[in-house]
Every structure is written in structure tokens, then in C-alpha cells.
Amino acid sequence: MTVTVIVGTQWGDEGKGKIVDFLAKDFDIVARFQGGNNAGHTVVVNDKKFKLHFIPSGVISGKIAVLGTGMVIEPDAFLKEVKMLEEEGIDTSNIMLSERAHVITEKHKEIDGKDSKIGTTKKGIGPAYADKISRKGIRIIDIIEKYPSIKKFARDTTFEINDAIKNKKNVLIEGAQGTMLDIDHGTYPFVTSSNTIAGGACTGLGIGPTKIDKVIGVAKAYTTRVGEGPFPTELNDEVGKYLLEKGHEFGTTTGRPRRCGWFDAVVAKYAVKINGISELALTKLDVLSGLKKLKIAIGYECNGKVLERMPVNLTNCKPIYEEIDGFEIKDKNKTLEFGYASLPVEARNYIERIEEITKTKVRIISIGPERSDTFIKP
């Protein structure tokens, strides 16, 4: 029995959905613990693209998919996503929706639509969580008679998850967004409205921390951010444009172009620390292919002080870079066939420098959008 948590180590959009889909074959249940349809996971399987906003990507592999208590759900949007999966021939009978999850209403979306400061997705997520915390919220259990289509998915998922763990089932847990968007530990106030870090898996699903065996952090080989807020390694130049276009960096939920920048090792080290990350999955390494020189932020200069750890406030912080030789992956199929050793030496140097700085091993590497474009590093 294994309980593994997958979290994002940056500002979201790290490719968690793809990594969950890649790993799902070895698990019985895939469960999500927070967020709503402000998050988007794009998974490509045999050239077919699935864009998911609520439902864990493990459903594509036929696994039990749990939408946990810590999530907020817009009923009509959830049912629309279920219908999309059914039209694609995906079995949705294994979807379980927590009766305790809170409901996003039209009023929540109206309130969210007036907020321009934070740069939210306008999906009503923040107002729904605000009503939950102020004890004015509506839960799925309160509306299932009104929505008989939802009733068949509604479960006491806290019981289901704990019962599965007791019965030695393998459980894969996923979060939405990323560490730097955590309501408590991110770049507040430019954050989401829930706990995106690994600890949120316990509260969002109702399992004890002693039940978790492993935490995998997903990191993009560079850094992106959607919406407002500080972003020290952001590139407003030709390299930034290159990453945007080659990486197809447009939000799954909103379609907004993502802000792009160099890999931020300060952010990565912080994510490793507060999530208890045991290993990393590095995605979109292929996007960096072709660049002559790469940079990694190893510290910040903030108001005249040099820092190697994450400050509480990133305002007026400039990155301190280390430069490293770039690389070119000329034969993707060869790399996928022969694995890590067949990567260019410069690519391996880049990966191993990330490992050295974060003191965490990279175990999974992705070099393309397809499920099959991923391999395990020894």
C-alpha cells in the first residue's frame, strides 16, 4: 500500500496532470484535495487532448477519481465535464464527489468577476471559500435532491479514502495550482484561496499525516506564472517570448498567456522544505532545447541584502543568476528509448545542478506533451 501526494513547486501549471496520468497505472485511486475549476490539467494520450478542471486525470486511465472535501464545485460545470468525458468514451462510474465539498453559486461568480486586483479566473472560487470559512456555505449534501444527476456521484469520500487505505489500496493524491499560490505560504495576496501544499491533502481529504508515504514535487524546467503578483525571474524579452511560444504557455482554464522566466531554485528549495518533497518530476525540458545559455536563480537581492532563501515579501527582489550551457535534444525517440544517459551532457548538467541546489533527486523527466514522452531517471 502506498499513499503518494503530487504537488506543484512553482506558481501552478507545472504539468501535474500529466505526471498524475503517467503514474496512475500503479494506483487504484486518484484523489484531489482542494481548488475548483480555477485549475486546469491538460493530458494528451494518443494525440487526444483532455482538458480537465475538476476531475483528477486518473479517470482517463480508468481509476477511481475522488473529488475531495476541500474542493469547491460548480454543479453545472462539473456535470459538463462528466459529459465531455463520456462523449470521449471514458467510464465516469468511478467518479466520487464529496458530500462535504462546498458549492460555487452564481452569486460567487458575480462577486469574483468584480475583482481585478488579484487576477483570478473569475470562477467564483474565492467567494465560495469565503462563505465556507464564514460558515455561510452550501455543501453538495444540501443540493443533491435538486441535482439528481450529481446524486449518483456523491459519497462520504472521507470514509471511502480511509477505508481504501485500510484495505491496502494504492492512493495517488493531487493538488491544484502550486506552492507559491498557497493561501498561507504563497506570494500573498496574489494567491489562491486554499492550501495547495502537501499538508492540505490531510485537511482536504480527511486523512491523517501518518498515512502519507511520499510527496512528489512537480517542477517545470523553467518558471511560469498566470495573473498578477511578484515573479522575480520573469523575462520580458525574446527568451521569454521563445518560452511562451515553444512551450504553448496559455492557461488551460482562461487561455491567458503565461508569464515566463528562468528556473527559480529559491522557489524550488522553499517548495521542497514546506511540502516535505522526497523527489522531483521535471517537465517541459524539451522547451529549453536549442537555447545556447540557460540561467538558474540561486538567490535574490532584496533591498540591498543578498538572500538564498525565500523572503516573506518578494517586492523589490531581483534574482541572482548562475549561468549554465544550454543543450539541444536532437532525437526525442532515442532519448525516450534509452533514457537519462542518452540526454546531452549539458542537459544532464542542468538537471544535476537543480538536484544539487534543491538537495532533491529528479526521478521523472518529461520531454513532450504525450503521456509516452516521459521516463524515469535512475
Image: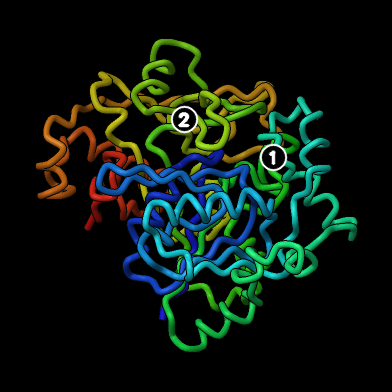
> Which residue position is annotated with label 2?
297
Whether 369 is drawn above or below 325: the answer is: below
Left or right of 142 in this view: 376? left
At x 64%, y 61%, the residue is 200
In the image shown, does 219 or 268 lie closer to the viewer?
219
Q: Which residue is mark 1?
A: 123
* Residue type, numbered disc 2: Ala
Q: Position of residue 113 (x, y in %)?
A: 77, 31
Residue 53, x across and y down, in percent: 55, 47
Report the disc number at residue 357.
none
The secondary element bearing badge 1 is classed as loop
Q: Residues within 10 Å of mark 2 (few under 14, many from 20)?
A: many
Label count reads 2
Mark 1 or mark 2: name the one nearer the start of the chain.
1
- Quadrant position of the N terminus in the picture: bottom left
Q: Is residue 268 left or right of residue 197?
A: left
Q: What separation in Å lies between label 1 and label 2 (alpha carbons)? A: 33 Å
12 over 172 or under it: above or below: above
Image position of 145 (left or right of 228): right
Residue placed most toward the observer, 358 or 283: 283
Type of the residue with mark 1: Lys
Residue 292 visible: yes
